[in-house]
Image: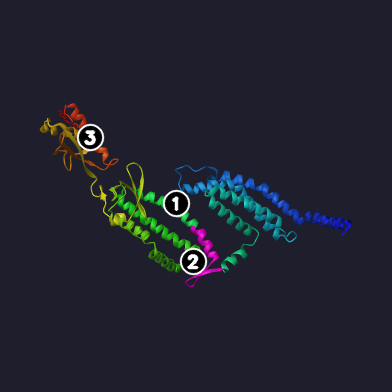
Amino acid sequence: MNSDVMEARLREALEQVLIWVQSPAFLAQVGAVIAALILAPLLARFIRKGIFLFRDAPAEDAKLLPARQIIFKAGNFLRAVMLVGLLAIFAAILKAVPMLGQDWLVKLAQSLALVFLIYRAIKTFVADPLFQKLATWTLIPLGLIMVLGYGDDLSAFLSGTTVFKMGEADITLMSLIRLGIFGALFFWLGGISNTRGQAAIRGQESLDSGVREIVAKLFQIILFAVLTVLVLGAAGIPLSGLVVVFSAVALGIGFGLQPIAANFVSGLIILFDRSVRVGDFVVLPDGQEGFVEAINMRNTVVETTDGKDIMVPNTKFTEEAYENWTHKDPRQRYEVHFMVSYTTDLDALEDMLIPEVLKHPQVLREPEMPDLEFRSFGENGVNMAIEFWCEGVDDGPNKFTSDVNFIVWRTLRDNGVEIPFPQRVVHTK
């Protein structure tokens, strides 16, 4: 092919493009795209000013705060949303007009706007990098398929591809996709509802603390059971399939989930028989001790007096022996030990020490008054002890004993009572 022929064909193609570009169908599409670009920010500004949910940031104490925060952040995408919507309307109008009948340019602009909108939404609302990538590589292609008009074909393919059977029902790719989408959405909302619901239940001061824990745990179980049913229904999986699911769970329990099931059942037993309640001070079989902070499905959280949390399997409280200092009565008996010399008038010690001990604001007179006891004859002096009762456990047992030890030391010092120390007599030959 010589250069003259190539030049002639190129000129012919260029003329055809010029005719096509100057056609009413193409110019109408360009006008629609320009109109959408102009109208989108105007509409977004009007909606933002007119609707307070988009205009004003929610206060920290606002009702439905998580939903309000999401709506407020979504206000940043109003322009992109308006652009995608306007382009979709213009594409439908152009397609409906017989003399125009083309919308490919508008669809291309709408696709670009949609990609931008989805990408910004993912970056704003999805914090985890892994989920950001998953959402980017699934939502953007899916959005493009829907905009370009292939949504029905994709839906038919997914609905017609059977993965496995659950009883008489076919579980298709569409069922699994719906299960993932609705499962993530419902259980995310369920997590928020569970947190707020349990906080509301535990805030009912008119109920006993044990009753509040039982009601809160029942609320959690019922909530997630209802969510499971809703997710299966939304995914198009028949509820008769729950029999298969429960059979698989039972098989899993038989093959290796016994500890999880045992801890779950033990947690329910603890809540209902109230052998351990939130706020109790317990001493575990291995000697660790602390306050019960929460009773969960699998474990009980025990916070030690130095601020550390111990995750104790619930079976520990149903199968092993442990000490619960505050199970029936918050009052506890404590002891402080000291030694005085053999030259001390022991008969005068009680009248000297007990009145001082009683001045401590947390030392009780019931069920017993503080008592001075003669314990034993020691190598260097007489071993004595004071027994006293206090209510509750304040930073562990050492809090009260430390206070009373100070009282004993100051009283003995002020009255000239000697506290002996080890002495040795050395004989020389």
If you read the primary sequence from the N terminus, does the residue marked by circle 1 or circle 3 appear first? 1
Circle 2 — which element? loop
The label on residue 55 is: none
Is 17 on the left or on the right of 320, as rendered? right
x%, y% of residue 117? 61, 50
Residue type pointed to by label 2: Ile
The residue depicted at 57 percent of the width and 50 percent of the height is 121
If you read the primary sequence from the N terminus, does the residue marked by circle 3 or circle 2 appear first? 2
Query: Is 301 in front, or is 225?
Result: 301
In this view, 45 is above or below 14: above
Residue type pointed to by label 3: Asn
Q: Write down the residue under mark 2.
A: 237
The residue depicted at 49 percent of the width and 49 percent of the height is 67
Query: Is 65 in front, or is 403?
Result: 403
Question: Quick one: quadrant of the C terminus?
Answer: top left
Residue type pointed to by label 1: Ile
- Separation of residues labelled 3 and 2 (CA atoms): 69 Å
Mark 1 Cα shell of 10 Å, populated few (<14), some (14-19), many (≥20): few
- Separation of residues labelled 2 and 1 (CA atoms): 25 Å
x%, y% of residue 188? 47, 54
Q: Write down the residue under mark 3.
A: 405
The segment highlighted magenta reads 161-183
